[in-house]
Amino acid sequence: MTARLLVTLTMALLMASTAMADIGSRIWATGGVTTIEGSAGGGLVPWALLGSYASDEEWGGTLALSRAEVDDYSLTVTGAGLNWNNRLELTVARQTLDLDSLVFTLKDGFGLEQDELNLDIFGAKVRLAGDVLYSPWGQLSAGVQYKRQRDFTVPSAIGARDDTGTDIYFSGSKLFFAAVLDRNLLVNLTARATRANQGGLLGFGGDQNNSHEVMMEGGVGIFLTRQWLVGAEYRQKPDNLNFAAEDDWWDLFIAWVPDRRLAVTGAFVSLGDIATLEDQQGLYLSLQGSF
């Protein structure tokens, strides 16, 4: 079913790109791609960039579908974003984590079975200052993500405190021209205040910690050509649940932007241990259309 969704979205984006003549005036690939939380950035980390190609006095938007397959889980994400004047980004995303009928065994021996978890994410990002291309210190943005866990039985049973939570983050991004072997280099640093467990899929807060902590995230990418970007991301994670330790995330990605209206991102992702299942690694694919 997921393969059909990816094919359907690809066809829809290609048809939309033919129908739309004007999608904004910003430079190629300066809107990034869509993260697993719906905001513009890489795959795992929000960047200071705002989605689409909308510049001052322009509207723009994005539609995206992503899929990650790791050893014992699979994650599907659908997302959409709206950019107003390259100043404000509004996003929405739905994450569905397929547990493959995993049984959570609790401390008292009670088994709890559930085949998927669903998380809704509503985001807003504001460009505070600068420009990723031309400002000496790059671009600075602030964002907020309100997250709502729709299936709280499992998170509650393993010690999560709440089914909703809010992340607040600050991101700085800068493109350095001809910085590495005469290729452009994009760097990003994000500081996030969060109490989300596994990004919110396992609820918020826990029996070890129930307060927001500041986590650091970052990314770097090299433009091999105008259409090809390769790089890596790292995302620090809190550790709120006594049930299972939570590891940091990282990825190695390659993004292809064959047209201003279409971006394709593939990655190798490492998510560490998730809910007692060790060393979750696998592949990630994302398709994004801009308008």
Image: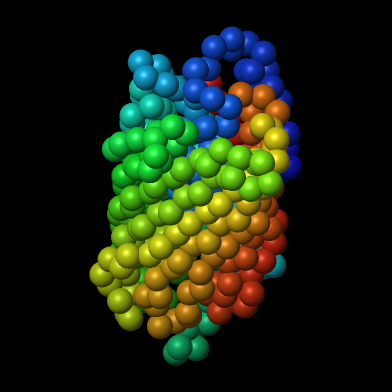
**Considering depth in this image, is 177 or 43 the residue closer to the camera?**
177
Picture quarter containing residue 142? top left
Residue 115 visible? no
**Considering depth in this image, is 269 or 232 the residue closer to the camera?**
232
Residue 246 visible? yes
Residue furthest left in the image: 211
Residue 273 horizontal/vertical position (percent): 57, 75
Residue positioned 58% across, 72% down in the render: 272
Side (left or right) of 291 relative to 257: left
**Considering depth in this image, is 23 or 91 the residue closer to the camera?**
23
Residue positioned 44% across, 37% down in the render: 132
Residue 184 horizontal/vertical position (percent): 60, 40
Residue 133 horizontal/vertical position (percent): 47, 34
Picture quarter containing residue 2? top right
Image: 270 above or below 45: below
Side (left or right) of 101 relative to 244: right
Image: 245 above or below 123: below
